[in-house]
Amino acid sequence: MTQPKSRLDQIIAETHQNRRQREMGYREQALKMYPWVCGRCQREFDHRNVRELTVHHRDHDHDNNPSDGSNWELLCLYCHDNEHQRMQEIASYGTTKNTDGGEIESTFNPFAGLADLMKKKES
């Protein structure tokens, strides 16, 4: 015999269900509205891997879903995780500025050396 769910369990389950429904709504809209390309790394997606493309809320408010998509951008899983990590760092350390006052920028360039690779391929 299973125990009846507590009121708290019911509220949590309803909250999760509502979130899933809300996410499906804006995700479907964003995928129809925007090209299937990560807004950061420019990786392209198709029907085989579109599940790896996520909707990022620019203002970090998942309840702010204007129908024009102005609060959304499509990011791959990796860039989306990186964006949220940056926000956690800002919350923890209070800034994204380095010691000379400039913005902290990534030193990773996924396209470094691409021109050389393309020249070798043409040869």
Image: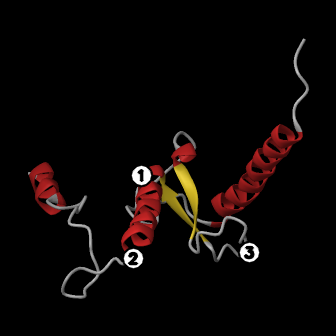
Secondary structure of residue under mark 1: helix
* Residue kind at label 1, given as amino acid type: Tyr
Left of 97 or right of it: where is 29? right
Reading the image, the residue beneath label 2 is: 94
> Taking 83 as reference, is 93 above or below it?
below
Reading the image, the residue beneath label 3 is: 66
> Taking 6 as reference, is 26 above or below it?
below
* Residue kind at label 2, given as amino acid type: Gly
Q: Are marks 1 and 2 in contact (CB under 8 Å)?
A: no
Q: Position of residue 70 (x, y in %)?
A: 64, 77
How many other residues sit within 10 Å of disc 2, few (<14), some (14-19) or many (≥20)?
few
Residue 97 occupies which quadrant of the picture? bottom left
Reading the image, the residue beneath label 1 is: 78
> Which residue is drawn at the image coordinates 71% and 54% (left, top)?
23
> Which residue is drawn at the image coordinates 23% and 63% (left, top)?
109
**Observer-nearest residue: 39 or 20?**
20
- The quadrant in which the N terminus is found is top right
> Which residue is drawn at the image coordinates 74% and 74% (left, top)?
66
Q: Position of residue 62 (x, y in %)?
A: 67, 64
Left of 115 or right of it: where is 58? right
Q: Position of residue 110 (x, y in %)?
A: 25, 58
Q: Most extreme residue toward the top, as rendered?
A: 1
Left of 24 or right of it: where is 59? left
Sequence-earlier tag: 3 or 1: 3
On residue 24, the disc is: none
How many other residues sit within 10 Å of disc 3, few (<14), some (14-19) or many (≥20)?
few
How many other residues sit within 10 Å of disc 1, few (<14), some (14-19) or many (≥20)?
some
Q: Most extreme residue toward the bottom, as rendered?
A: 101
